[in-house]
Image (cartoon, rainbow, N blue to C red):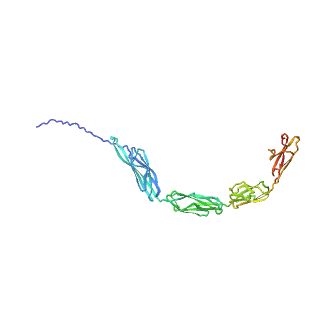
Amino acid sequence: MTGFGLVRLWAPPLFVSVFFFLSFPSTAHAQQIAVAPSALGFGNVPVGTSQTQPLSITNTGSASLSVSSVTVNGTGYAVSGLSYPFTLSPGQSVGLNVIFSPPAVGSDSGSVSVTALTQTSKHYRKRTSSSTASATATLSGSGISATGQIAPAPAILTFGSLLPGTSQSLTETLTNTGTASVVVSQAGTSSAAFTASGLSLPTTLGAGQSLTFSVVFAPPVSGSISGNLAILSNASNPQLNIPLSGNGNTPGQLTLSPLALNFGSVSTGSPASLPGMLSATGSSVTISSGTSTSAEFVLSGTSFPTTLAAGQSVPFTVTFLPQTSGTATANLSFVSNAANSPATESLSGSGVAPIQHSVDLSWGASSSSNVAGYNVFRAGVSGGPYATVASANSGTTFVDGSVRAGQTYYYVVTAVDTSGTESVYSNQVQAVIPSP
């Protein structure tokens, strides 16, 4: 029998190393890019034109973004204003333009998508990784037919009050406010008192273009006159009507007062003047001229042309200056737009040879024994100043033959001795010369 002894087994210690790989979430946000607005509506846009709206791209995360592309989907849509790729720092924004150019009539929808590459950091051993972020804006719009539209300025033409036979012109402008060219083919008025001037038809107006012409009002009779200017074209408003109105006034009357001027007898070479008055009745009157048929009758006191409102008057003066003896007649005519033009006033007068007036003066002799003569003085007003009319007059009488009809004169006399000494003035005497 075999015996067994106690055997102990010793195992060496076992060391196990366990390595844990810890990962931490990225500090970047799940969505790091945004566009604003998120939807762009262009509404109705005429075919052949375009409309632009802005779009903003913003980095809303905490890491830089590298924008690699902007993709446009939909018919008629495009973008402009950016070059790719570009980088956006956190919080940074850029703008671009979205353009809608409808190629045909109808609704168009689409989108603008922005794609960016984000850089994400791992905190353990500084590892980094990349991810893609994107944002989209929806687009909508409709293409509509391009049309022309004619707009007048002013929309109504109102003329003033005119006398029949006269005219007034006002300016009218037509503008194509639509989106397509317009052919203006005809223009006509419903009343012969109104005519369009300066239009060469047919003519084409592009979008936004204008043409200017004149409308003339010439009333054939008195009274209120209205009409209509019709503009025909291929615009969306094919017949444009512009109301016209004006008034024909009843011609005024020019009244002369008095109807005749008689100057009586007037010395040849001496002027005589009489007043007259011009008045307008009924309506305003424009006086263009006033003329006399004789050079001996001269009109003054007013100028031409002159306009008198109804009820207004203006004075004038006629001067008669006869050159020879005998009867003189003439007519004074005023030409105006009054119904009674020309208005005429008769003029008459007689030229007579001037009467030679004189003043006989006499005075008492001086008591002085050595008086050599006397000086005679005359004035036109009492008390002088006096002017000498005779010097060293040897006698005590003098005849003044240089006086004029209708005037008043005042005389004084002084005595002068042999040594030349002159006395004071004598008392003053007055002489009134008759007229003529």
Q: Residue furthest left?
A: 1
216 left or right of 377 in image: left
239 and 132: which is toward the camera: 239
Total labels drawn: 0
Q: What residue is rendered at 82% in x and 48% in y?
A: 409
Name the spot of residue 46 as percent of width and height, x first.
47, 57
52 left or right of 382 in image: left
196 and 10: which is toward the camera: 196
Splitting the image into 4 quarters, where does residue 334 fall?
bottom right
Name the spot of residue 112 as percent of width and height, x first.
41, 52
Is residue 53 depicted above or below 366 in this figure? below
Name the spot of residue 380 as percent of width and height, x first.
80, 47
98 left or right of 400 in image: left
Name the image quarter holding the N terminus.
top left
* Residue 229 appears in the picture as rendered: yes
Splitting the image into 4 quarters, where does residue 336 fall?
bottom right
Is residue 62 depicted above or below 112 in this figure? above
Name the spot of residue 400 as percent of width and height, x first.
83, 49
344 and 206: which is toward the camera: 344
Name the image quarter holding the C terminus.
bottom right
* Residue 174 appears in the picture as rendered: no
